[in-house]
Every structure is written in structure tokens, then in C-alpha cells.
Image: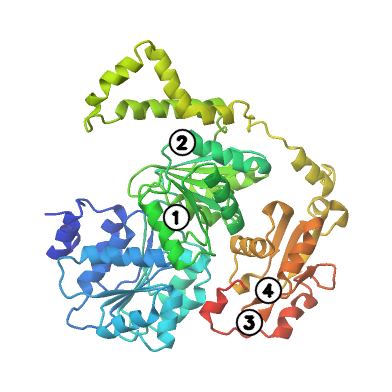
Amino acid sequence: MNAFEALGLNETLVQAVTDMGFETPTEIQEKAIPVLLSGTTDFIGLAQTGTGKTAAFGLPLLQLIEVENRHPQALIVCPTRELCLQITNDLETFKKHSRGVFTEAVYGGASIMMQIRNLKKGVHIVVATPGRLIDLIERKAIDLQKVKYVVLDEADEMLNMGFRDDIDFVLKNTINRESTWLFSATMPSEVRAISRNYMNNPKEVTVGRKNSGNENIDHQFFVVPASQRYEALKRLIDFNPGMYAIIFTRTKADAHEVSERLSKAGYEIEALHGDLSQQQRDKVMGRFRSKNLQLLIATDVAARGIDVDGITHVINFELPDDMEVYTHRSGRTGRAGKTGICLSICHSRESYKIKSLERMINAKFHKVDVPSGKDVCRKQFFHFMEKLMDADVSHGDYETYMPDLIEKFADVSKEEVLQRVAALEFSHFLKYYENADDLNKMDTRGSDRRQSDRGSDMNGSRKERTSFNRRDSGYTRLFINLGTKDGFYKASFLQFILDESNLKKEVLGKIDMRDMNSWVEIDQASAGQMIKSIDGKRYNNRTVRMNEADGGFKRPNDEGGRSDRATEGRKRIYAPKERRSFK
């Protein structure tokens, strides 16, 4: 008996899986499929991306569908357009031998009228992103009353992107569902809250350890001064010829700048960020998937849902502020049983983050020296020699040219020919790296100076060292009437204020986020630019206020600290598109 048949799948689905070349189920498939085939059990599956989750819920759904009833029976909700399309394509492959099952992908960036027409024709399974699904519900273009099965895929990603209200809305409007299946890489408190509120005694299956990273990934980090991040990145790329990688930055400004510099240096790279139209985004992703691009650089928000096979490396140009984001970044490599490498470029002050990550994902991080210029040249040279020896000369009429070549090089030794070939191939590397600095000799004076400026006397009190509002420190503290209630988490809030002000992260100190307000520590020289850029902007149909914390705003535990929000009203208006708009 086939291993998939033993799980309870019918013959047509087993045949489709066999046609795909799969003989043995993955761990999450083996544990999930028998439970989900009952159709009446709520289910939580905790597993990293790339472990076969789509088949784990897609195959049971296809078997449970009643083909004769052509209306939405199953709803799969996922965070991004890319993942929506990927799931739909996988379902099409799974049902190649199953006649009469219709699926439809609904997502933003495509014609909503076309999606409405397809839904009216009758479909069994709808795969949707939250925003477009809500639009369709409000237009009464989709009826959720007969939906039996709801799947939340990448639940933690959706919550990180601010879709909590959307998920609540969907689950409250699928009142006749027989089961809810939740799949997530991590299990933060928000995901646990959904399971408590909307699921009945769910069966929970964990592949690996909770919140753990993929065991096939080698986690490495490099410690360099902040000013040398780009140079360290370039060396890591040069030291790994054949690298096929995603580079993560915190802000779209960094993604654009690094992409431009590497592109000018001759690297095949494109940036993926929020300013791209859907057509531009699709073009970039098409080039990356076809490997016409060696490198893709992206912010966390722009990279949501990217699922590309064969990625060898993930590079963190900077570590994320939200530690759970690291799990999603690193999970882009080491998929489907393959090995991968996650490289992180850090500053000496970020060593505590490495320790936190080790505890969170239960994996060891290896501190590695940034390669020297000579190491890079040597690695490139040996890579070229391997390509030279592996070159296929069986095709082509090379014999025609051999007499001329032999005559031309009659008086040239083999050693000299090899030297000349090496010179043609490596002259640019040799020139660039011949006087390269050792990036591993950390210059910590800047860090020490900043600590000194902040009054970090070793004998001083902790309160004195961590004070936010010391003007003699060179930093000032800004108040802004946005907080976690606005759907922000620390990484997205940081990206928002940096993108809006066009400033670098280096000018910031600590960020103190509360429910309704936040405080931002910033270099005094840059405070004016940030206030000018952000104060007065519109966000969620209200005016954003930002100015110096000394200018009349009180701390969060003071009654006056809440007055700005109170005067504008506490009522939340349901408007998915505007809620996720930065401007």
C-alpha cells in the first residue's frame, strides 16, 4: 500500500501525489492528514515553511468536498498574493485526477470584477487574502454561510501584518463551519488567543519544537561596525559564488540603496518594496524564480509569502527588532529537506539579540569572521577553476579552431596561459581587494562614545544610564500618538517612522511602545526632520501628532498622556484598506 494511501487518501489524490514524485509523506502531512480527513476536528499545526503544509491541508480538503454542491465549502485565508497563488496552483496539481472540483484565488492587485464573475459561476474552494476577502463580503459577492472548513495558513504572519480584525470578522461570519484548521510557524499569544476564541478542543500537532527554527539551517553571524555593513555584505556575496539569496533590510530606503550600489557593481539584484506596483513586483519575482536574478533584497513586509525553491542563503543586512520575524526570514532557505545558511550582519551592541534568538529557536549561532580580501579572491579563483574543468566541450565545432589556437600559443607555456586566463577573470577582484581592510577589527570608539555621552558611568545608577530625555546626551525624546492599538509591532513601527522621515536607523536610540502612544529616542540633529516629516500626517482617518516629549505630553501612565487619543475618539471604524495604509 502506498504511504499516502495508508493515511486515508483516495486513489485519485494518491495518483496525483505519485505523479509529482512524492513517495513518503512529510512529518506534518503524516500527522495532520488522518485527523483532517474526519472533517469535524479543529486542528493546530505548528511547522516551519517548506515542510509540506499545503499538501497537509489541501489533500484532505479536496477529499472532503461535495462536488455536486457547487458553492464555497472551504475557505483558505493566507497573508499575501504570492502565497495565495502558490496554494491555488498546488491545489490544481493535487486535483488533476479529481473531476468537477473548482477553486478560485481572490487577492488584491487583480480585477475584482473578474473574481466576482468566477465566484458566481460556482466554486468549491476559495483561497483568499484578508483584504480582498473582506471587500467581497461587503459587496455580497461571496456567501460564507455554507462554508464548512476554514483554513488559516501562516497565521502568525497575518497577525504580524495587522490582520487580526479581518480574521475575527471572517471567523464570526462562517458560523456554520464544521472545523477550523490553523497552521503557523510560531505560536505567539495572538495566535493562541484565536484558538481559544474560535476553536473547540483543537488537536495540536508540532513538527520540531514550538517556535523553533529549521534544523537544516546553519545560523552564522558576523560582527562589524555599523558603517561597514555594506562592505561586509559585499564580501559575503563574493565569498559565496553561486549564491542564490534573499537579503533582508529593515526599511525600503535601505533596500533601494543597497540594491543600487550592488547593481552598479555588476551584481544581478533587484529590490522588492512597497513602492512597486503589482506588475513590477510580479516581474521582479518572475526573474528571481527563473534565476535570472542572483539576489533579491526586500523588507519584511514586501517579502511576506515569498516561496521560492532552492534559495541557498538568507542574509540579514540587519537583525530584525521583532525576534519572531527572524524565524520567518531564515525559513526562506533550507526547505523541503535541503540545507540552507542564514547569515546575519550585526553590531557589537546586538550580541544580546543573538543570545535571545538562540533561546527562542533552540539553535546554536556560530560567530564567523568576515572573509579577508585574500580569502575572497582565493574562493573565487577555485570556483572558476571548477567551472573551467567542468565546462562541456562536447558540443560545438571546436576542432576547427584548434590548429589556429595551437599556432597562436606555440611559444607560450601552459602556466602563462593559465595566468592570463586568471588575469582576465579576476583582475577586478584583485584590484578591489588588494588593500582591503580587516573588517573583524572592531572600532568600538563610536559605541563607547555614545555610551559615555549617555552618561553610562560604570558606577552610575541604571536609571542614569538608560535615561531617555537627557538633552546633554545628544539625544532627544519624541512623542507620537500611535501605538500597538494601531496595529503596529516594533519592527513595522520602526519601518514606518524611518520610511516616512527618510532617516537611517543609526540616528535612533530606544523606542518605547505603548497601547496608544510611543516614545522615540533620536539624535537631536535629526529630530526636526522626523517631526516635520510625520507630524500632521493622516493615519487611520486621524491626524498623527509628533513633537518633543518635553513639549506638554506626559508619560503613558499619566492621565494627560492619553488625552490626545481621547479627544479624537476611541471608536474604531472597520476599514481594512485604510487600516493598513501608512499615509
Task: Judge whether residue 369 can be spotted in this image.
Answer: yes
4 vs 2, front mark: 2
Residue for point 68% across, 54% down: 504
The answer to whether the residues at label 3 and label 1 have Cβ atoms under 8 Å apart is no
Question: Which comes before the other along the chain, label 1 or label 4?
Answer: 1
The answer to whether the residues at label 1 and label 4 have Cβ atoms under 8 Å apart is no
Distance (Cα) linking label 3 and label 4 = 15 Å
3 vs 4, front mark: 3
Disc number for residue 210:
1
Distance (Cα) linking label 1 and label 2 = 32 Å
- The three-letter amino acid code for the residue at tag 2 is Asn
1 vs 4, front mark: 4
The residue at which mark 4 appears reads as 516
Question: Which comes before the other along the chain, label 4 or label 2?
Answer: 2
Q: Is residue 352 left or right of residue 279?
A: right
The answer to whether the residues at label 3 and label 2 have Cβ atoms under 8 Å apart is no
The residue at which mark 3 appears reads as 541
Q: Residues within 10 Å of mark 3 (few under 14, many from 20)?
A: some
- The three-letter amino acid code for the residue at tag 3 is Asn
The residue at which mark 2 appears reads as 240
Distance (Cα) linking label 3 and label 1 = 38 Å
Q: Secondary structure at mark 4?
A: loop
1 vs 2, front mark: 2
Residue for point 71% across, 80% down: 565
Q: Quadrant of the N terminus?
A: bottom left
Q: Residues within 10 Å of mark 1 (few under 14, many from 20)?
A: some
Distance (Cα) linking label 3 and label 2 = 48 Å
